[in-house]
Amino acid sequence: MPSKLLIAAPEAAYEVCYTTPFGIHIEGEIRINGREVMARVWSERDRFVGRVLGRAASIPAQDRYTGYACFIDDTVLAIGDYATVQAHSVVIATGSGPYIPPALLVFGDRLVVNDDVFNWEDLPHRIAVFGPGVIGLEVGQAFARLGVQVRVFDVQEAVGLLTDPMVVEQVKFDLGEEFYLHPDATIHEMKLDDNEAVIVFTELDGSVVTGRFNYVLACTGRKSNVDSLNLENTTLQLNKLGILVFDAKTLQCGTAPVFIAGDANNILLLLHEAADEGKMAGRNAAHYPDIEVLPRRAPISIVSADPQIAMVGQRYVDQEPRNIVTEAMDFTDQGRS
């Protein structure tokens, strides 16, 4: 939710700039105070987080443990160094953390992830964003509208979870009018120089450019928070990407009485999906060994950019072209749009 808090300020600033056609004239200079923008983000973030922590704290003390948990075996957990729990079944819901490609580590302390952004006291002058996914596009456009020079890079040609070439091109055109968006960039060199991140890349017009940035923001995906669970003490298996092997229909890990829900399983990293999976995993864990396949919602994801981007159902890249009839509608000349 902090990203949505950050979006609110640039939306207000943007709308103020385009009131003249409606006969509304704003006299004087529009001034953006970065410290005040970030102070509001801090305040609202703390309020939201406080509510979540409050709900956790409302669980009766005799029904909860506080500390880091790790496996001793499939159904025995150590809680810190003060308690051991023998469980009938276990649900892993440890969430995920930012994944940082090793190549970006060259930027040292100029490299940040989205969590770091919401601790800034002021707005930077120039940032480079790697990864035009949901967060990359939302934060990139937000900072651009707040007067920050933004360049968004990637090397995979994907934009905001979209894979349909026609839609990707339209999004690149629309968002590219506000900030530099290059989802299939050629990067020649990356380094840290004089406390600035330096990136040498091929510009959209084919020229080679050297850019200097205050920060590089890595929006390059998420990874499951399971590294500290001591999974080697269990019968659970990991795939080659380090993700627990589990049945996506029941959320059970192998044949063990262990279930995994939410961002930790890396299926769909969305709040409503995590909530549904928590219920699914909890139900099956409580009724183990009588587990069942529980219904899922149709996949849906939204990017709160301008224009907004929504995707419902199966992704274009996952479809079999010969079995799918595709129709497209362009509302550019539709008066009601």
Image (cartoon, helix red, strand yellow):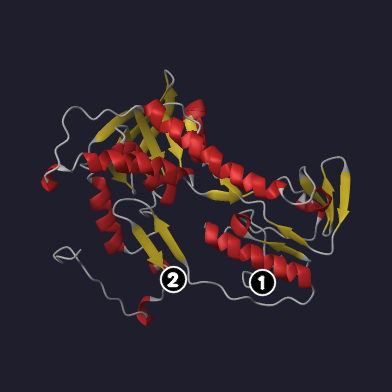
Q: Report the side of 64 relative to 196 (left or right).
A: right
Residue at 27% in and 48% down:
175
Binning the other alpha carbons within 10 Å of mark 2 as few (below 14), some (14 to 19) or many (20 upward) gives few
Q: Earlier in the sequence, mark 1 or mark 2?
A: 1
Where residue 84 appears, x then y in whole percent? 88, 49
Q: Which disc, if any, is residue 250?
A: 1
Where residue 68 appears, x then y in whole percent? 76, 43
Where residue 106 appears, x then y in whole percent? 49, 30
Q: Which disc, if any, is residue 180?
A: none
Residue at 13% in and 65% down:
333
Question: Which quadrant holds residue 160?
Answer: bottom left
What is the C-alpha distance between the residues marked 1 and 2?
A: 20 Å
**Count the marks: how many?**
2
Amino acid at dot 2: Gln
- Image position of 258 with respect to 35: above or below: below
The answer to whether residue 226 of the structure is visible from this angle is: no
Q: Report the side of 152 relative to 120 (left or right).
A: left
**SS for dot 1:** loop
Q: Which residue is mark 2?
A: 314
Q: Report the side of 250 relative to 160 (left or right).
A: right
Binning the other alpha carbons within 10 Å of mark 1 as few (below 14), some (14 to 19) or many (20 upward) gives many
**SS for dot 2:** loop
Where residue 12 appears, x then y in whole percent? 30, 41
